[in-house]
Image: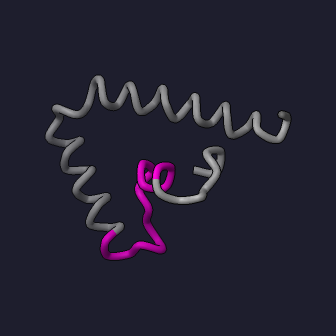
């Protein structure tokens, strides 16, 4: 259980940050531009830039390393 605690705490932190982002920023044009830039960077440099959502949802990266 001790070895899982860092991941559990990181998941809780990521969840709260995601909730705040979705609740307050998704209607912002700056937010949408940032997301487009993240997608372009990831498409151009996939080993150098991985958006946080992609890293957490689609890789084996532990939550506390994201």
- Where does the image place residue 60, in percent across and percent down from the top left? 59, 58
Q: Residue at x 42, y 48 (%)?
A: 53
Q: Is residue 50 magenta?
A: yes
- Where does the image place residue 63, in percent across and percent down from the top left? 61, 45
Name the residue furthest right: 2
Residue 27 falls left or right of residue 12: left
Q: Quadrant of residue 42?
A: bottom left
Q: Is residue 44 magenta?
A: yes
**In which quadrant will I find the N terminus?**
top right
Residue 21 falls left or right of residue 61: left
Q: Residue at x 26, y 31 (%)?
A: 25
Above or below for 26 versus 45: above
Residue 37 falls left or right of residue 53: left
Above or below for 62 versus 16: below
- How many numbered circles does the render carry? 0
Q: Quadrant of residue 21?
A: top left
Above or below for 22 versus 58: above
Display coloring? one colour
- Where does the image place residue 55, in percent across and percent down from the top left? 49, 55
Residue 33 falls left or right of residue 15: left
Which portion, as a residue range, is magenta? 43-57
């Amino acid at each position: 259980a001790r070895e899982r605690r860092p991941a559990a705490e990181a998941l809780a932190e990521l969840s709260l940050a995601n909730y705040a982002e979705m609740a307050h920023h998704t209607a912002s044009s700056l937010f949408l531009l940032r997301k487009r830039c993240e997608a372009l960077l990831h498409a151009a440099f996939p080993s150098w830039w991985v958006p946080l959502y992609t890293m957490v949802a689609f890789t084996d990266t532990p939550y506390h390393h994201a």
